[in-house]
Amino acid sequence: MDSIIKKYQQRFRKIRDEMEQWDQLQSRFISQFRNVSSIIQRLKVIQESKNYGSLSCVGGIEDAVLQKQMESLQTFFLSMKNTLNDFHVIVLSLEKICRDSKQLVKGGSSQPTMKQMQQRIGVKPSLQACVNGLMLLHEMHHSEYLLKLSLFSALSALTLKPSNSDLGALQQLLVDQPNIPKEEVQFIFDIIFAEEIQ
């Protein structure tokens, strides 16, 4: 039983690294989102000739500025897609770790009873705490990934009909990361690595 717990802890160490990468991706995604929002907000302004003042006399200035902004927008959308792919890689990794870890319990020569699953050895976590922690981490990050996909789709749709209030609401949703309470993630790690904290 002790050896299985140690294997679970190894998996949680890998997940801790994934969480650090997730946080870096989150910062990058928010930055990309803000850049896209800024461009979308500018699109309406740069399409009105009255906003060019004395530059209006330069032939084709409006089209050139609009084209440049649309190119930048496409570049940022592509960057956001790449970041979403990186998020997805982490979600798939968590799913695989979760699936493989269930096999650790099922694949042994003798399957543990419910009492053994809930039994703790000293300060080490129970097998049930390990299984539940992995499942919870996967579910939270999978839900958050789906939310990010939805936000990306909504942002793409706003390109055609920009609304500052909608852009602000979407950005707030993204920044809040409502599906991943940091204290809950930390609590899971504290349970799994209790003996290291002692």
Image (cartoon, rainbow, N blue to C red):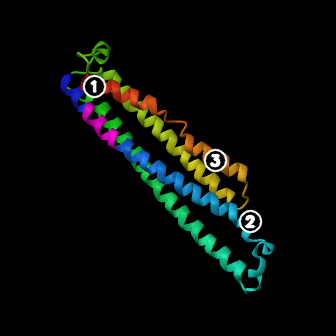
Q: Earlier in the sequence, mark 3 or mark 2?
A: 2
At a point 72% along the width and 49% down the height, the residue shown is: 165
Q: CA distance from mark 1 to mark 3?
A: 39 Å
Q: Amino acid at mark 1?
A: Ile
Q: Which mark is residue 44?
A: 2
User: Residue 55, percent across and down?
Assistant: 74, 81
Residue 11 is inside the magenta segment: yes
Horizontally, is 172 left or right of 78 in the view? right
Quick check: marks 1 and 3 in contact, CB under 8 Å? no
Q: Is disc 2 placed on a helix, strand or loop?
A: helix
Q: 14 and 30: which one is in front? A: 30
Quarter containing the N terminus = top left
Q: Which mark is residue 83?
A: none
User: Residue 33, percent across and down?
Assistant: 57, 55
**Pointer 3: residues within 10 angstroms few (<14), some, or many (20+)?**
some
Region rendered in magenta: 9-17
- In this view, 29 is above or below 134: below
Q: Earlier in the sequence, mark 1 or mark 3?
A: 3
Horizontally, is 175 left or right of 5 in the view? right
- In this view, 94 is above or below 61: above
Circle count: 3
At a point 31% along the width and 35% down the height, the residue shown is: 12
* Residue corresponding to mark 3: 170
- In this view, 114 is above or below 102: above
* Residue corresponding to mark 1: 197
Q: Amino acid at mark 3?
A: Leu
The answer to which quarter of the image holds residue 91 is top left
Horizontally, is 55 left or right of 142 in the view? right
Quick check: marks 3 and 2 in contact, CB under 8 Å? no
**Pointer 2: residues within 10 angstroms few (<14), some, or many (20+)?**
some
Q: Main secondary structure of the magenta part?
A: helix
